[in-house]
Amino acid sequence: MFIVLSVALAGCHNKLKSKPVVAEPQEAQDTSHDAIYNFSFGDVELWTLKDKVNTMPAALFPDADAKIVKELMPNGEADAGINVFLVKHNGQYILFDAGLGVEKGGEMMRLLQALNIQSSDISAVCITHFHGDHIGGMLTNGDASFPKATVYCSAEEVKAWKTDKGVQKMLAAYDGRVQTFNGGETILDDIVTKAAPGHTP
């Protein structure tokens, strides 16, 4: 089965040459953990891991209708969930993003342990973009959090953040294990990337 997982990326706008077949999600399973949501998607098993809930200020929406913003954010802010996605496919565990990191209160590592998954079990990490709430968990005490993982990230995103010390430190920790791609390319045999610039390049 050909699986498509849409990931917000930078890069080229190449179109797929053939239309993929996408499986319908099956009924969710009870994981008995309020921060883990698990369901199957064809031959793929997927977990949503609640890394942390932060708040976002109304100032993030300067062009929005002030009346609507006041109605939706009466205290001037709203909850903003930070999630990490874990996929098991073809015998591999693949992460999509890595949350805030333990140092900033991220729960990803604890939730992986709750699933009896070790950091060394992660074979790949696919990064949507380089904001701190998506790559903070890539390092633990300055070292690579996932010692056996190959990191997949957009070539345009790498180029755009080449002067950012935090991003460069993260990439250096995975030296030799970073694979870049352009939007529309297929990675890990059957994951099709999708260009969606705007939030970052």
Image (cartoon, rainbow, N blue to C red):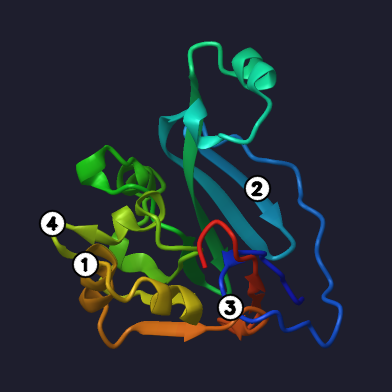
State the residue at coordinates (63%, 74%).
Answer: 193
Q: Is residue 34 visible?
A: no
Q: Quadrant of the N terminus?
A: bottom right
**Disc 3 target residue:** 11
Image position of 129 (left or right of 104): right
Question: Which residue bears the numbered disc 2?
Answer: 39
Disc with the residue nearer the chain's start (3 vs 4)? 3
Indicate left or right for 97 with 7 as reference: left
Measured in 3D between alpha carbons, the distance from the residue under mark 2 to the one under mark 4, in whole angstroms, is: 32 Å
Which numbered dot is residue 165? 1
Going by the numbered disc 2, the residue's amino acid type is Phe
Report x, y in % for residue 159: 41, 79
| Residue 141 image label | 4
Q: Which three-letter amino acid code belongs to the residue tagged 3?
A: Gly
Residue at 50%, 36% in the rendered image: 60
> Whole-percent x and y of residue 173?
21, 74
Task: Give the residue at x 48% y 30%.
Answer: 59
Q: Earlier in the sequence, mark 2 or mark 1?
A: 2
Outermost residue toward the left?
141
- Between the C-alphas of marks 2 and 3, the distance is 30 Å
Mark-to-mark CA distance, 2 and 1:
37 Å
Q: Is residue 45 above or below residue 13?
A: above
Q: Nearer the viewer, residue 181 or 198?
A: 198
Q: Whole-Å distance between the Cαs marked 4 and 1?
A: 16 Å
